[in-house]
Image (cartoon, helix red, strand yellow):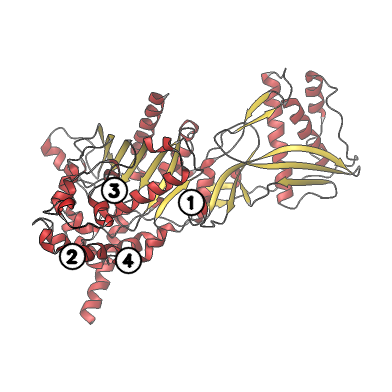
Amino acid sequence: MYDVDMTRLISTFFLLTTCLILVGCTTSRFAKLQSASVNIVQANDPAQLPVLITFNTLELESYCRTLPATTDFGIVALLQCANELLSRADLSAQQRDFALSAYNRNLTLLVKAEHAGRLAKDRVLIHYENLVPFSFVDDIVALDKRLTPAITGEIGLAITTSRDNTQTGLDIYFPLEGVKQSATILLKNITLQQEKTLRISVEIKASNDNNVINLGDNKYQIRHSPAAAYLDLLEQANIDDYNWLGMVSPTQAEKRRGVFVIGNISQHKIPIIMIHGLNSDPLIWRHLTMAILNNPALVANYQIWHIYYPSGPPPFYSAARTRDNLQQLLKTIDSPRLAKKAVIIGHSMGGVVANLLSTRADHQLWDATFKLRPEQMDSVEPAVKDIFIYQAVFASNTVFFLDTPFKGSEVASSVIGKLGAFLVTLPTEFTKIFQNFFARTGVHILTDKMRPFLINYGPSSIHVLRPGHPLMETLYDLPIQGESYAIIGSDGALSCQDELTCSSISDGVVNYTSANYLHAKERLIVSSAHNSFQNEQAIAFILNKLNVAQDDTE
């Protein structure tokens, strides 16, 4: 017993250490709140609201500039004045800039002062429509500069809202940690109550596909930050607690499986689906996700869906489950347009899953596994067929493969890989699929090449990633429904001219020969220790292709 326990302990230590090196540590803290002190002096003059409609636009601008922007009543009066000025049809560009600056500054001062309890409510009272818990975007400070959120738009106070995930309805497609949304605080109106209190009504407007407000006949882009809502989510995220668990004990991590929308669900924006690899989680995509969310043109045309799946079972099974998760989401959204096109991005084994989501397998994988076709058997369980016979989820795909072991990885065959395979406990819901199937058919229907992998009711993902796996070889020849790009990691040279020099390139886990998807439209070698997902050149490459695809669509 001592020898067995010691072996398991040593195995755990070495594999965990190696995985941390290869995958990269994910921190549980990505941002901090840092708010500046807001002090507003009480005015000596009585509260009043002048009738501004009697001023022409030039007179109104001059009046606005005379108002004291230091006292509570003066700030409210300037906010009212700026709001009226922004509604004028003959507003000049210079007047527009002044009014927007005054509107945003004074609305921010009042709301932040009220939020900090520094407004006398018998003098200035702020009433919220649709009040929900929120944070100010400019108070959220990223600890990693690459995660700094941008604010786009021109009017309003950008915030992020937060609520618990109810795990009902559409909430099942949002991260379990909570539903974080981009929103904006906007002025509704200002009234004088009991001749002494200025009542400011504001609304919290959730970001959507039409972030525009009308003041008079003028349209203004609402200030908001989808990236800040994502950073707020990152700070609360605990999905990275399930990366190791998802590999060695998938059953315990199964409760976190799913497709998770970052931001809002859209019925028309193209999904960008990001899939992590072995012993990993969706947080690896934080730099790429932030780069997309900080790009207004991309936000206007794409929505981001993160995938989490326990990575211990083989990728063919994980792909079948993910395929079902995606189809359920598409069915729930009920927009046939969404099924036409998608961008799928996979890292390492996640690239294998991406391949399985974007190809069509008629009988190729089945014939590589079984000697008889399904129609030659009495019956075949749907769960078995779903693994080997399937169609692509989306009609047209743009697939990015990052550090993907199309031809396996020598690490999976090494001592470390064998120790890792020893630690994996396959979930019974997976092993029972083949146990029940073979109880009826017998294992004699397996091909000679697949018999070693399935005779004990299924291999782990590590077994599948060893070079020479028959299903991996078969999958390699299936054409993508769309186009693909290969991003190849290297811990040394970033270019090569011939087969010999290229074969020496590796990221320490996957070599060039394995990661070089021959069907790719383009390929890029980047500096990577099997973590191309955070490489700035790789991210810039993906963003460029997304922009080009967007321009082509237009």
State whether residue 412 is above or below residue 359: below
Tell which tag, 2 or 3, sits nearer the viewer. 2
Residues at marks 4 and 3, CA–CA distance in whole angstroms: 19 Å
Return the residue found at the far bottom. Answer: 1
Quarter containing the N terminus: bottom left
Give the residue at mark 4: 249
SS at circle 3: helix
Tell which tag, 4 or 2, sits nearer the viewer. 2
Q: Amino acid at mark 1?
A: Phe
Residues at marks 1 and 3, CA–CA distance in whole angstroms: 21 Å
Q: Amino acid at mark 3?
A: Val
**One can see residue 39 in this view:** no
Residues at marks 2 and 3, CA–CA distance in whole angstroms: 29 Å
Splitting the image into 4 quarters, where does residue 402 fall? top left
SS at circle 2: helix
Callout 4–callout 3 Cβ contact below 8 Å:
no
How packed mark 1 is, by other alpha carbons closer than 10 Å (few <14, some 14-19, many 20 or more), is: many
Quarter containing the C terminus: top left
Q: Amino acid at mark 2?
A: Arg
Splitting the image into 4 quarters, where does residue 459 fall? bottom left
Give the residue at mark 2: 440
- Disc number placed over residue 353 in the picture, else none: 3
Query: Residue sitting at 26 percent across and 41 percent down?
Result: 359
How packed mark 2 is, by other alpha carbons closer than 10 Å (few <14, some 14-19, many 20 or more), is: few
Query: Residue sitting at 90 percent across and 39 percent down?
Result: 45
